[in-house]
Amino acid sequence: MRASTRREFIAGPVGRIECAVDAPEGAAIGIALIAHPHPLFGGTLDNKVVQTLARAFVELGYEAWRPNFRGVGETEGTHDDGRGELEDLAAIIEHAKPARLALAGFSFGAGVQVMLAQRVKTERLVLVGVAVTRFQLPNVQPGTLVIHGEQDDTVPLATVLDWARPQDLPVVVLPGADHFFHRKLHILRGLVRAYCT
């Protein structure tokens, strides 16, 4: 499936939000909102893991929205430790009003999506390298897909297991993968496609 990408600018709580929107061929079955890693450490909507997540969802028939967080690219505002970023993601959903919604995120973005999933109805929640060390995260819905690298030295696997254990939440561990899933992105893409099929 060949995708086309366009730029959208959404009115957010503190100014415009820049989004890259990847559209499938034909009518989309819903929207996948995908959140990028920490903006103060180089995270943008062009992050390779974020692009891989978008590609997987487009292949499944979703329109994938990849916003830049506050202060990144052409998104206005300044970094707000997840609070304002959460409000911006909610504003995108309010603008798009999808009939079906999937949420996905990487690292910092995954942490923000956990909080957003407490507020909106989502069919799918995909968390990659979720930043459990940066946020006090609530429990997630049953059936959430959590993917983590065995050799992640940014968010140690043990901390994710400690968060997941009380929830009886399975964690998919990619052997040999680091935080950015170098040389493992094709596996990540396959996992997301299998989960959502």
Image (spheres, rainbow, N blue to C red):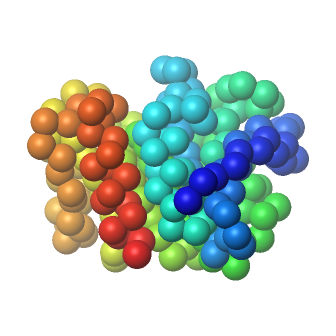
Image: 101 above or below 65: below
Residue at 74% of width from left, 55% of height from top?
A: 92
Q: Nearer the viewer, residue 103 or 186?
A: 186
The part of the image, by quadrant, that contains residue 82 is: top right
Q: Position of residue 7 (x, y in %)?
A: 79, 41
Residue at (63%, 46%) from the top-left corner?
66
In the displayed structure, 10 sits above or below 168; it is above
Answer with the quarter of the image where residue 191 lies: bottom left
17 or 184: which is nearer to us?
Answer: 184
Count of numbered tags: 0
- Give the x, y percent position of residue 78: 71, 26
What is the x, y in percent for residue 103?
53, 61
Examine the rendering and report whether any part of residue 33 can be seen. no
> Which residue, as the protein is rendered here, is positioned at the far front?
2
Q: Is residue 172 placed above or below 106 in the rendered structure? A: below
In this picture, residue 182 sits left or right of residue 94: left
Q: Residue at x 39, y 64 (%)?
A: 193
In the picture, which quadrant includes the C terminus? Answer: bottom left
* Quadrant in which residue 144 is drawn: bottom left
Q: Is residue 68 visible?
A: yes
Q: Position of residue 3 (x, y in %)?
A: 63, 52
Q: Residue at x 60, y 36 (%)?
A: 45
Left or right: 39, with 190 as reference point: right
Q: Quadrant of the N terminus?
A: bottom right
Which is nearer the eye, 99 or 191?
A: 191
Horizontally, is 172 left or right of 36 in the view? left
